[in-house]
Image: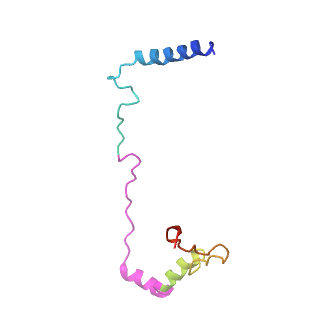
Amino acid sequence: MSSRIPCAIAVALAVVGAGAHADPLTPSPADEPRYESGFDGYRADTEIELRDWRATNDRVRTVGGWRTYLKEAAEARPEQPSHPPRPSAIGTRVAEPTNGGGK
């Protein structure tokens, strides 16, 4: 037990000594704010090719209209069930109220 006391004193002095050198009013470089622009990594919007709207509408009509695009989008997604799966009968019993434990 006597060997623990000098070790504890040495640790306490090291902690107090380490804190004595730092000025609490002077911020460390890690505490200083760093400027980061919100425009870093900004990609300028590119111009889209303008097309004749009549030709575009004719193209949609020949393809089959908006329903064809809807069907293509539905086929691209994995099929999902229309309703959530039902829980199994095991472990679904609801506990009866106890009314505070007495009647």
In screen coordinates, is 22 left or right of 14?
left
Residue 39: where, in percent of width, then height?
35, 47
Q: Residue furthest left?
A: 25
Question: Which residues are the magenta region?
Answer: 38-66
Residue 38: where, in percent of width, then height?
35, 47
Picture quadrant where residue 88 is located: bottom right
In screen coordinates, is 70 left or right of 89?
left
In screen coordinates, is 48 left or right of 85?
left
| Observer-nearest of 50 and 98 | 98
- Look at the image and tell me in which quarter the N terminus lies: top right
Picture quadrant where residue 4 is located: top right
**Figure disc tally:** 0
- 33, above or below 28, in the image: below
Question: Is 23 included in the stretch rendered in magenta?
Answer: no
Q: Which residue is at 57% across, 77% downward? A: 84
Question: Is 62 included in the stretch rendered in magenta?
Answer: yes
Residue 34: where, in percent of width, then height?
36, 35
